[in-house]
Amino acid sequence: MSAIRIVADENIPMLEPLFGQLGEIIRLPGRSMSADQLIDADVLLVRSVTQVNRDLLQASKIKFVGTATIGTDHIDQQALAELGIQFASAPGCNADAVVEYVLSALIHLAHEQSFSIFEKTVGIVGVGNVGSRLAARLQAMGIQVLLCDPPRVDQDSSLSDQFTSLTHLLNQADIVTLHTPLTDQQPHPTHHLLNAENLSLLKPNAILINAGRGPVIDNEALLSFTEDRPDVTLVLDVWEKEPEVNLQLASRVRIATPHIAGYSLEGKIRGTWMLYQAYCKFAEISASVRFDDLLPDADVTSMTLSAQASEQASLLPLVKLLYDPYQDDRAFRATLLSDRNEQKRLFDLLRKTYPVRREFSALSLKVSDHQSAQLKALGFSVSETY
């Protein structure tokens, strides 16, 4: 097979070990890719910041487009099909990372606000790759979960008893976390799914988390809502007009981060590897690199947990060892400047220079028998019990 020319977002990891053997790799800033830069390309690999449409591609000879993300709302798939371009995404690649972002935030907030997560009801809106995995972990931990996903119920009416309406979920859940795709399509558009009318349904002292897509919440309505409801704790990883951020809203958010919920090392590498697998299948060549070959050892790979550690108290130091969302929050707030252009530049710089973050499974634990089930449910590897 002759060498190909691959244009890729500069933030996609492990391109050389996976695609370097196939041809020349040209790395570009994803947010500013232009049609002129793609004229001689054969393959385009992007992340969520690149709008891939007919105008970007029609002058090129590209035959394969891949996005190293779960979401595909930045891809005009109809245009790709009409141009005869093969498309691949990476569904589920960083789902565990987003789940662990949510769990980490909740465990930190439980410690900070002195509540037990085991006594809370968590409402999950959007039960796809991320939402379903979050629900599975929470339920395995014995935490009550409410699920809302009308499109899934439409596809399979037998699921109706397992799901509830958005109105009921907002009324009943202590914690609401959003994991829907972004769409304007009827009958279930998600753009401004939470708005001035239904935000008011949130329970007193509720926690609202958005680690999905920014415009799923009307950010202006949310800002107004916070003026009357300071009791609600906000955790926002995504923003309606990102990379531009509403500074007033950010000042009222307890944990604010720059769209990095899925940025674990495992998640980012898995996304690239999935595109490599898809391209090899498209090009009818053998995929010679295994995912496990790409993962380095974590800084801390194993530890022993005291048998005397209490159920919830033991969770915070373990989670914090691998991920502390407040570190991302502090770094992000330092970039929230009144100069909008500089603020937007720094938003992307934080994502580009994001430090290595490992998933819970990278840490192998030796624990007592009574701790084992809970920690496995949370996502840690349990190597031995005593």
Image (spheres, helix red, strand yellow):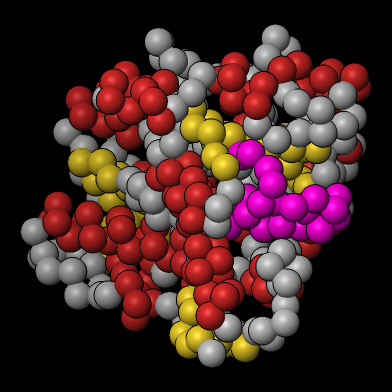
Task: Give the residue displayed 53% in from the left and 33% down from the top.
Answer: 146
At 26% across and 31% down in the image, what residue appears?
80
Q: Is residue 314 left or right of residue 292?
A: right
Residue 65 in the image, given as x and y percentages of width and height: 30, 44
Magenta: main secondary structure equals: helix
Give yes or no for residue 27 being in the magenta stretch: no
Classify residue 43 as left or right of residue 201.
left
Residue at (80, 38) in percent of width and height: 233
Quadrant of the rendered image containing residue 355: bottom right
Visible in this render: residue 324? yes
Q: Depth check: 172 or 222 in front?
A: 172
Using the image, determine if residue 289 lies above or below residue 147: below
Q: Nearer the viewer, residue 4 or 383?
A: 383
Give the residue displayed 68% in from the left and 37% down from the top.
175
Quarter that holds the C terminus: bottom right
Relative vertical location of residue 267 with respect to residue 211 in this rendering, above or below: below
123 displayed left or right of 183: right
Could you tell me which quadrant the N terminus lies in? bottom left
Q: Height in image: 266 above or below 90?
A: below
Residue 172: % across, % down: 65, 26
Residue 376 position in % (x across, y down): 49, 69
Which region is colored magenta?
A: 100-122
